[in-house]
């Protein structure tokens, strides 16, 4: 039975703001069901939000770190109390399975709590006494942050910005994706209510709102997670005012399976399958192409199919037996299907994986049968492009040099993984061009919020998570108090 649609609003200077236009968000599992309505903010709304954040920054930047932490901890507690309801809303508007939605909140809380627990140590002044005098290195807030977040992991990728940004003394205007706007707005509202008006604002809208957030001179930093193409437009929009940026962008993350990988390790094979298909393959750090040493290739494929067929169960996100829900939107479904159809037309072999639990639900929603692609060429679009959906190609390689070369032959370098005997895998990992390389695991399974995360090449600039993820929202301020105030080589 369908639930009543909800309505969310922009939040500007602590108040809910209604807009002339709204847009609806459907349930990807049941596209005829409207989950809710979000505002279509205007450029003027964005300017108001930026002005509110800019005004709030004048006083918020002088607030004590103890106060910021206390307020954020209250927000975390209220979010935890609301999680069952919020996770259900996320599953409905996103399409991901309910357990997956709950897991996203768990990751968000791990990060937010880490940021609160370590902020004092990370943000403290460093005082260095030396022969030349005293030097103090402080970490000052930057100013107003524009946070632009995607639809695939909307809660995690919003709180990853909001928590350190506000704890560091900044204010923020956040813009969610129109493909997952509802739960994010609810989450931001709960957090914003614990802070003074204007510290945390949220607006929605089209490109004109995005342009304002990236070009307005009162914006000091941009924190963006999304596609590389969009990031290039953001960089251009921000060029005139030279803003600080953290950009976590696209990736075509590779898994390299070495000759000494144990294909009979069922748990490892299950981790591989999950690393390819969790959230229907719609995670930036999903392993999107797998290279397997030819000596174990046939056995690997056989065991992979067995593991996939055991774990993959496609259907309604609220069915407790389901592990993979719908693709988030119709456009993404069509794109992934086009990659599959194109590879098939060029001679690749398609193997459907797992079980569809309810054909009627499957046929009505934005579902795709998870698909293994074999015999694709190394340069097929399904290999070299980011699929961002429930399909993965597995390809053989002949020797380690070739395998490493295939992994690195990409404009992207977000995450990667190496699978095999641990010491051997670590040696190989040093040669991989990526921001993160995981050993015998991949994707969210190997994520540790205590350490920095981000990409190389066209997968991004800067780091989130870890100490770097907090310091990324600060300016380094050096205060020098020299002992010798006059330089001896300057004539009188």
Image: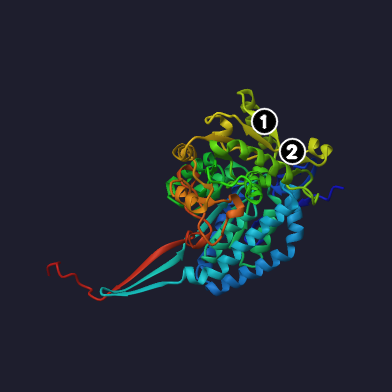
**Label whose residue precedes the other's in the sequence (1 or 2):** 1
- Numbered label tally: 2
264 with respect to 211 (left or right): right
Which residue carries the number 2 mark? 366
Which residue carries the number 1 mark? 350
Does dot 2 land on a helix, a strand or a loop? loop
**Where is 330 relative to 268, above or below?**
above
28 with respect to 229 (left or right): right
Residue 212 visible in the picture: yes
Point out the frontmost of discs 1 and 2: 1
| Quarter assignment of residue 56 | bottom right
Q: Are marks 1 and 2 in contact (CB under 8 Å)?
A: no
What is the crowding at mark 1: few (fewer than 14 residues within 10 Å), some, or many (at least 20)? many
Q: CA distance from mark 1 to mark 2?
A: 20 Å
Q: Nearer the viewer, residue 89 or 348?
A: 348
**Where is 131 relative to 273, above or below?**
below
Residue 446 badge: none
Does dot 1 land on a helix, a strand or a loop? strand
User: Residue at horizontal 58%, vertical 44%?
Assistant: 287
Residue 77 position, x and y percent, is: 68, 68
User: Residue at horizontal 49%, vertical 63%?
Assistant: 467
348 with respect to 55 (left or right): right
Q: Nearer the viewer, residue 97 or 471?
A: 97
**Where is 408 relative to 344, above or below?**
below
User: Residue at horizontal 79%, vertical 45%?
Assistant: 316
What is the crowding at mark 2: few (fewer than 14 residues within 10 Å), some, or many (at least 20)? many
Residue 443 position, x and y percent, is: 59, 50
Residue 343 position, x and y percent, is: 61, 28
Residue 95 position, x and y percent, is: 73, 45
- Please state, as top left, top right, bottom left or bottom right, where the C terminus lies in the image: bottom left
| Quarter assignment of residue 328 | top right
User: Residue at horizontal 70%, vertical 67%?
Assistant: 78
């Amino acid at each position: 039975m369908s639930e009543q649609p909800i309505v969310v609003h922009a939040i500007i200077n602590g108040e809910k703001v209604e807009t002339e236009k709204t847009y609806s968000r459907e349930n990807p599992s049941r596209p005829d069901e409207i989950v809710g309505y979000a505002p279509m903010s205007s450029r003027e709304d964005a300017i108001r939000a930026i002005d509110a954040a800019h005004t709030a920054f004048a006083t918020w930047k002088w607030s004590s770190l103890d106060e910021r932490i206390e307020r954020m901890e209250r927000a975390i507690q209220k979010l935890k109390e609301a999680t069952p309801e919020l996770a259900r809303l996320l599953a409905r508007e996103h399409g991901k399975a309910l357990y997956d939605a709950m897991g996203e909140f768990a990751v968000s809380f791990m990060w937010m709590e880490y940021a609160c627990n370590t902020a004092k140590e990370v943000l403290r002044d460093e005082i260095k006494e030396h022969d030349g005098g005293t030097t103090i290195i402080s970490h000052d807030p930057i100013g107003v942050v524009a946070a632009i977040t995607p639809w695939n992991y909307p809660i995690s990728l919003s709180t990853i910005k909001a928590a350190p940004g506000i704890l560091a003394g900044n204010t923020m205007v956040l813009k969610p994706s129109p493909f997952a706007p509802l739960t994010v707005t609810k989450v931001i509202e709960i957090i914003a209510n614990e802070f003074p008006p204007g510290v945390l604002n949220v607006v929605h809208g089209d490109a004109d709102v995005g342009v304002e957030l990236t070009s307005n001179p009162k914006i000091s930093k941009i924190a963006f997670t999304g596609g590389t193409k969009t990031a290039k437009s953001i960089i251009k929009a921000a060029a005139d005012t030279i803003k600080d940026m953290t950009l976590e962008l696209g990736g075509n993350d590779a898994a390299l399976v070495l000759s000494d990988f144990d294909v009979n390790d069922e748990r490892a094979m299950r981790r591989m399958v999950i690393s390819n298909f969790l959230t229907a393959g719609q995670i930036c750090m999903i392993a999107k192409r797998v290279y397997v040493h030819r000596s174990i290739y046939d056995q690997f494929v056989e065991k992979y199919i067995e593991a996939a067929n055991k774990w993959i169960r496609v259907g309604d996100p609220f069915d407790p037996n389901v592990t993979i829900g719908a693709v988030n939107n119709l456009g993404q479904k069509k794109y992934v299907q086009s990659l599959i159809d194109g590879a098939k037309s060029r001679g690749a072999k398609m193997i459907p994986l797992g079980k569809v639990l309810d054909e009627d639900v499957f046929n009505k929603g934005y579902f795709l049968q998870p698909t293994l692609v074999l015999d694709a060429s190394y340069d097929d679009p399904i290999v070299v492009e980011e699929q961002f959906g429930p399909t993965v190609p597995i390809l053989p390689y002949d020797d380690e040099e070739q395998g490493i070369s295939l992994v690195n032959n990409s404009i992207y370098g977000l995450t990667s993984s190496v699978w095999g005997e641990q010491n051997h895998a670590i040696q190989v990992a040093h040669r991989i061009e990526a921001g993160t390389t995981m050993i015998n695991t991949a994707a969210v399974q190997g994520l540790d919020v205590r350490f920095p995360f981000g990409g190389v090449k066209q997968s991004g600039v800067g780091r989130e998570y870890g100490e770097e993820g907090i310091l990324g929202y600060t300016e380094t301020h050096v205060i020098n108090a020299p002992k010798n105030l006059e330089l001896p080589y300057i004539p009188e």
